[in-house]
Amino acid sequence: MPLVPGREAIPLTGVNQFEPLPNVMNILVTGGAGFIGSWLTRHLVTQYPHAYNVICLDKLDAVASINNIKCLFSAPNFRFVQGNINDLQRVQSVLETYRIDCVIHFAASSHVQNSFVEPFTFTHDNVVGTHHVLEAARRYGKITRFLHVSTDEVYGETNNRKVTEISNFAPTNPYSASKAAAEMYVMAYRQSFGLPAVIVRSNNVYGPCQYPEKIIPVFTKLLMRGEKLTIQGDGTNTRCYLHGSDAADAFDTILHRGKVGEIYNIESDYEISNREVAARILTLFGHDPVHDFDSHVKWIADRPFNDGSYNVDGSKLKQLGWRQRIDFSSGLAQTVQWYKQNVDSWWKSPDSEPAIFPAINSRL
């Protein structure tokens, strides 16, 4: 069923005191008000109301939104804490106050484009921030599962060959380098301190609630304003697209069936070029993707380096029972429609009234 906003707001600061559901697992999701993190947060709270207490820790920077989780505020098994993962004492306090059993670490700076302009921000947030979460978990000493969310970009440009979890790192931009470095710290804490860590590397996630800096929401916003779509380079770069609900199911599967010490790729079957994304969104706005294409596109300079493709082998995850459910055509149509309704209000003040969320899949 669709999720609707809760009626009671929770303060945006301070650790909220509550009596957790007894005899259940307490899960901390860092970055849980961000895009992918909020998909999993909503999934866990609603699919497991009697099994998990879910604590969302997020600093609520520009790319996050309280609206992503506002619909959960009335749920007895959910609490929100505003805080920065680079505040070690804050993270430790959350672990101890809520007696956390499991950490799912999403919090990160993720926009590749920005990493070329402000690379040290990515080192600070993704490397140092991850180190703070790891160290807090080590000092706390009671974590039974630590899921670290990484990216397919740590492999670098794959040139249409599928890479497995044991393939070498070859990051090509500051963002992917920071995520690779963060993984090294996770592996070190697993080896040195016995942290029960699992690493997840996902293909490109899209869907409602993603901050409008990535290609699908950007193109939607431009067409809503009657402006041309801006395509970098020649538009032939491809990405493998995974809907947010499928990503949530994948993380759920890894949480319940994954093995400590392992790494899992999340693979999408839908490899789409930037040019094709533009054509499909033009179609959804009623334009002819062939005859109207050139008149609705503005070609701009490419990134300093732009990986051609990221192709990962997700066989290991599929062996755990996960399958991709949302085809790109229907997922894109749903996403574009959501942005048409919400893009101008979703990232404003917490008092803005959020719309109804799309339905969330149940776990396999």
Image: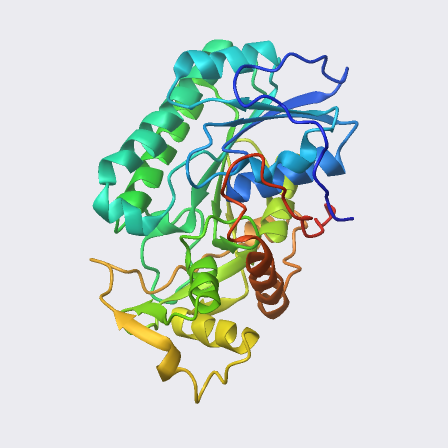
Q: On the image, which quarter does residue 300 sit in?
A: bottom left
Looking at the picture, the colour scheme in use is rainbow
Q: From the viewer's side, name the closer residue of 258 and 325.
A: 325
* Above or below: residue 270 compared with residue 149: below
The residue under the point 47% across, 17% down is 91
Most distant residue in the left direction = 304
The residue under the point 43% across, 11% down is 89
Q: From the viewer's side, name the closer residue of 227 and 267.
A: 227
Q: From the viewer's side, name the closer residue of 106 and 19.
A: 19
> Where is residue 114 shown, x and y percent of the image?
29, 47
Q: On the image, which quarter does residue 107 sit in?
A: top left
The residue under the point 46% across, 77% down is 279
Judge from the rendering whether residue 29 lies leftward or rightward of residue 133; answer left or right: right
Residue 254 in view, yes or no: no
* Above or below: residue 66 compared with residue 248: above
Q: From the viewer's side, name the closer residue of 64 and 24.
A: 64
The residue under the point 44% across, 72% down is 278
> Where is residue 311 shown, x and y percent of the image?
43, 60
Q: On the image, which quarter does residue 159 sit in?
A: bottom left
> Where is residue 112 shown, x and y percent of the image?
32, 50
